[in-house]
Amino acid sequence: MKNVQSNRATHKPKPGSQKSKGLFRGGLLKLILRILKITVILFFAISILWVILYRFVNPPITWLMVTRGFERKSAGKEWKIDKEWIDFDDIADPMKRAAVAAEDQKFLDHFGFDFKAMEKAIDKNAHSHKLIGGSTISQQTAKNVFLWPGRSYVRKAFEAYFTVLIEVFWSKKRIMEVYLNEIEMGDGIYGVEAASQAYFHKSASDLTSYQAAAIASIFPDPLKWSPTNPSDHVRHRQYLIRKNMRRLGPLDF
């Protein structure tokens, strides 16, 4: 028995030996993989619960609003988040039609992505220095509500993921409602109710087709464009939006 024990002792890896280092690295790798697995599971669980929560609870604030607030402070301006929620049924029909006509005419038909529009945008961007977006209303909602501002492949991947989630767990009606209430509409102005009050001194429930098209015309660049003092480019966008609004069939939400 003593001989057996002594033989086992001689085979025990010494500290600093190649075998002990291999055991340490193997244990460390297993720990890292375990932590990574738990992190991934938590991410999926939290993100899904977050999306489900916002199906019933209106998002109180977004990363973009916070970022813009700090940008205003750094520029010597006062903190400003002008935002007032308005329920979907209270938003004037022309405003909903203007949003679809301006940003995503296939909104009610696709499952979050318009691949033809994306291909068209990629082709145009390849031959132009000015980037053109091909994002749907669903993608913009996912970006505005759940993600940070900026451009990167990582953020686009997260955008695609959250777009799928809101298409699965939300209705088109809810997506449009959140979109119209969270979108940036000017310096410190968010959502169509605040925009309607700021630009036309009335509720978004009372917007005319002309006013709705004017608001929708600045969606791509609300910090530079004005619905009430439009440049020739913005005025042309308003004309095209009104034209597309007349072409749209019934919006069955």
Image (cartoon, rainbow, N blue to C red):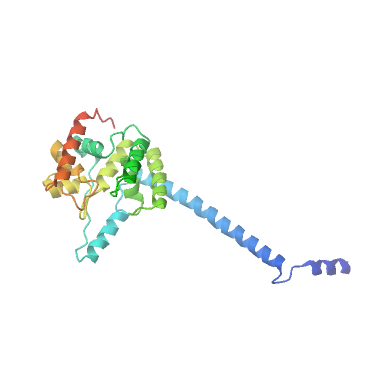
Query: In this rendering, would 2 be left or right of 18?
Result: right
**Camera-nearest residue between 177 and 117:** 117
Residue projecting furthest to the bottom: 15
Q: Quarter of the image holding residue 11?
A: bottom right
Q: Position of residue 134 (x, y in %)?
A: 32, 42
Q: Quarter of the image holding residue 135?
A: top left
Q: Position of residue 104 (x, y in %)?
A: 29, 37
Residue 141, visible in the rendered structure:
no
> From the image, which quarter does the C terminus lie in?
top left
Q: Residue at x 65, y 65 (%)?
A: 24
Query: In this rendering, would 162 be left or right of 70?
Result: right
Against 9, is 56 above or below? above
**Camera-nearest residue between 238 and 27:** 238
Query: In this rendering, would 31 be left or right of 138?
Result: right
Q: Residue at x 27, y 55 (%)?
A: 65
Q: Quarter of the image holding residue 14?
A: bottom right
Query: In this rendering, would 9 be left or right of 204?
Result: right
Q: Position of residue 143 (x, y in %)?
A: 34, 48
Q: Residue at x 27, y 48 (%)?
A: 182
Against 8, is 210 above or below? above
> From the image, which quarter does the N terminus lie in?
bottom right
**Camera-nearest residue between 134 and 127:** 127
Residue 125, visible in the rendered structure:
yes
Residue projecting furthest to the front: 127
Q: Position of residue 232 (x, y in %)?
A: 14, 45
